[in-house]
Image (cartoon, rainbow, N blue to C red):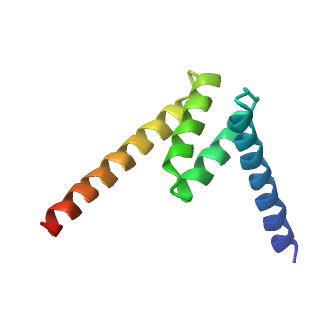
Amino acid sequence: MDTNFEQYEEEKYFKSLVKRFEEMLKKNEQYFFDVDEFEIIIDYYFEKENLKRTDEAIQYAIAQYPNNTTFLLKKAQFLRHQIKHKKLWIFSLKLKI
C-alpha cells in the first residue's frame, strides 16, 4: 500500500515540476530548478517523445549549470536520438518511392 502512495506522490511531484517549467516558458521568465529537478523534467519530455520540449529543457539546464556533465550527456543523447529519427524518416521516404 505504501508503494502505491509513494508512486502517486512521486508522479504528482513530477507533474508539478513539468507544469512549473511550462509556466516559465509561457511567461517567458527564468525560474530556478535544481539539478535533480531538471533531470526529471528532461526525462519526462524525452519519455513522452516531446523533442521540442526536451531540447528546451536541456538548453535551460545547460544555461543554469554550464559545467554539469549530466546535462551535456543528455544533450548528446538527445542529438543522437534526433539523428536516428531523421535517418528512419529518410529511409521511410525511400521505401515509398
Q: In this view, does 16 lie to the left or right of 45?
A: right
Considering depth in this image, is 5 or 15 the residue closer to the camera?
15
Q: Does residue 17 show up?
A: yes
Task: State which quarter of the image contains the N terminus.
Answer: bottom right
Left or right, residue 63 beside residue 9: left
Q: Nearer the viewer, residue 26 or 60?
A: 26
**Residue at 37 percent of width and 47 percent of height:** 82
User: Dividing the picture into quarters, in which one does residue 6 lie?
Assistant: bottom right
Q: Where is residue 80 in the image (x, y as percent from the top left)?
A: 36, 45
> Considering only vertical position in the picture, is 4 above or below 28?
below
> Is the residue 15 above or below the residue 71 in the image?
below
Where in the figure is residue 22, as x and y percent of width and height?
A: 70, 43
Q: Where is residue 36 in the image (x, y as percent from the top left)?
A: 70, 40
- Farthest residue, direction bottom: 1
Residue, far left:
97
Residue 71 is situated, as x and y percent measured from the top left of the image, at: 54, 34
